[in-house]
Amino acid sequence: MEPLGQYPDPTHVVAHLSDPHLLADSLQYGAIDTAAHLERALTRLGRLPTPPQALIFTGDLADKAEPAAYAKLREIVEPVAAQIGAEVVWVMGNHDDRRAYAQGLFGVDTEAPQDRVHDVAGLRIVALDTSVPHWHHGELSDDQLDWLRDVLAEPAPHGTLLALHHPPIPVPMLRLAELIELHDQPRLAEVLAGTDVRGILGGHFHFTSWSTFAGVPVSVASATCYTSELAPDQRLLSAVDAHQSFTMLHLYDDRVVHSVVPATDGPEVSGYGLEMLEPFLALTPQQRFEMVSHRNSPLNRPD
Ligand SMILES: [Fe+2]
Ligand SMILES: [Fe+2]
């Protein structure tokens, strides 16, 4: 559709999902079918009016790092990505295992940090592995920071998104998560200073959050499996099978727009069918404006 307002179409559209926590053949906490929950999110993603050019999964891909869970992840995600023509960007999380992840997703036998660079129509997406084997907090080695510095030395045509699991921001809504945050964050800030990184994407929290880091916008996508209960009722820590979502990014030359998309359907209370589109597009720009903006238009006062 032609732009109807003041802004051009975005240059890039990216979907940011996180923490699917897939399991080979068991339910998470005996209750959550994580594969079905991921499929539910992807079904809704497939219905978006503008399909994303990339699907970024910021870690905790497999709850127990079972090889069969990574295979199942590919079986679920890759057909959807192929159908909409999107590149898949995987990122390591603290529940993942480097060897199983590298083998299952890339066919590589290694325990090295899983850092990769993707080019999506001139938008550079860097997947940075903040995981620490056998621990839940995050770290980046000197070698990884040197690698990142080299990658970012040359700007990309449309800038860079940095995707990592442990978001480098405070976590005031879930204080216990402070113990599993990314360590030594100023070292990362120093590497990002003056580069073309225009967005940092993280997961790990299982709720949506935003902030900045070293002047760069940070967006944390919630989980597709369970979410952290941010208003717990007399509970120290509470995970709930509700409120799952993912985040859409629309990139413009001078900014990024983030929109949270719930991963579950809701009951419609008002709306119009697709049959309305063709007659609407046949109207003049002024008629369209009046149709949508005037309070007494047939659209706004159908009866
Ligand atoms: Fe997680
Ligand atoms: Fe995590």
Image (cartoon, grey):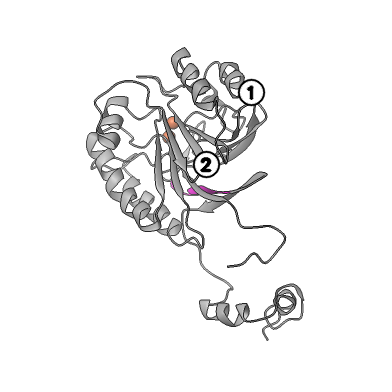
Q: Which residue is mark 1?
A: 193
Res. 139 visible in picture = no
Q: Quadrant of residue 134?
A: top left
Direction bottom: furthest residue? 303
Name which residue lies at 61% across and 77% down: 281
Name which residue lies at 45% across and 24% down: 130
Q: Which residue is mark 2?
A: 123
Q: Is mark 2 within 8 Å of ligand 2?
A: no
- Of residue 298 and residue 196, the one placed in the foreground of this image is 196
Disc number for residue 267: none
The three-letter code of the residue at mark 1 reads Ala
Horizontal and vertical percent for residue 139? 47, 18
Is the residue marked by circle 2 packed among few (<14), some (14-19), or many (20+) residues within 10 Å?
A: some
* Residue bounds of the magenta highlight: 240-250
101 shown above or below 191: below
Direction from residue 246 to residue 37 in the image, left or right: left
158 shown above or below 138: below
Res. 151 visible in picture = yes
The three-letter code of the residue at mark 2 reads Leu
Q: Is mark 1 within 8 Å of ligand 2?
A: no
Q: Foreground mark, 1 or 2?
A: 2
238 inside magenta stretch: no
